[in-house]
Amino acid sequence: MVLRILDLLRTINRGIALVVGLGLLACVGYVLLEITLRRLGMSLGGTTEITGYVMAVTTAWSMGFALMELAHIRIEGLRTRFAPWGRVFLDLLAMVVMAATVVTIAFRAWPVLARSIANNSRANTVLETPLWIPQSLWFAGWLWFALMCCAVTLLALALVFQGRLGAAESRIGVRNEVADELEQAK
């Protein structure tokens, strides 16, 4: 059951990553159109503002995907010297620290959004974008990442308590690129 939930979360995050990627592609298209129009003496305007929003939102939303794909950076020098239970302990410690950090970021992001809503804040740019729009998408991405960190940590703990260290390590450990290549070669 735990592995099925983790697989479902991975599938959901892959879908989110696809949407985020499409958003980035749309942003690239917008920038290319802006560059072309500038060569012709015209401009859409707001390119810097829009691309800044897109980068903030896509970064926040892509973190859950990186978590589920084991793409977050870890320093392996110490970890590899331990037996499986030691590696899983370090992985769990890393997950707890990451979850605490991300929950804190999400918790601190809310007042930024709340203040923009309360003050009806707008960007000090030509577009005068109501800031609650990009900030709500940005906050939602951080909130999603915080939920993913907490859920994955709890599910990994469940696997450890079931005595399934290998399964826990494969879901929260470090991606073994050599093993992945051997698996794909089969």
Image (cartoon, rainbow, N blue to C red):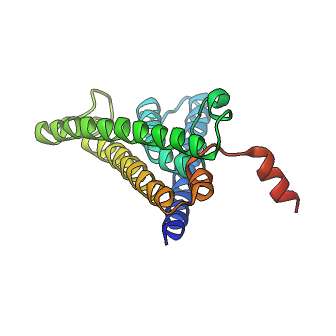
Quick check: 154 left or right of 75?
left
In the current view of this chain or complex, which residue is farthest to the right? 185
At 48% from the left and 55% from the top, the residue drawn is 156
Quick check: 22 left or right of 128?
right
Of 55 and 149, nearer the camera is 149
In the current view of this chain or complex, which residue is farthest to the left? 118
- Against 172, residue 125 (above or below) is above
Residue 130, visible in the rendered structure: no
Of 19 and 99, nearer the camera is 99
Quick check: 6 left or right of 148?
right
Residue 121, visible in the rendered structure: yes
Quadrant in the picture for the C terminus: bottom right
Quick check: 142 left or right of 24?
left
Quadrant housing residue 11: bottom right
At 57% from the left and 50% from the top, the residue drawn is 21
Of 174 and 9, nearer the camera is 174
Residue 65 rendering spot, x and y as whole percentages: 53, 51
- Against 88, residue 164 (above or below) is below
Residue 104 rendering spot, x and y as whole percentages: 30, 36
Residue 37 rendering spot, x and y as whole percentages: 57, 35
Residue 79 rendering spot, x and y as whole percentages: 62, 34
Task: Give the mark count.
Answer: 0
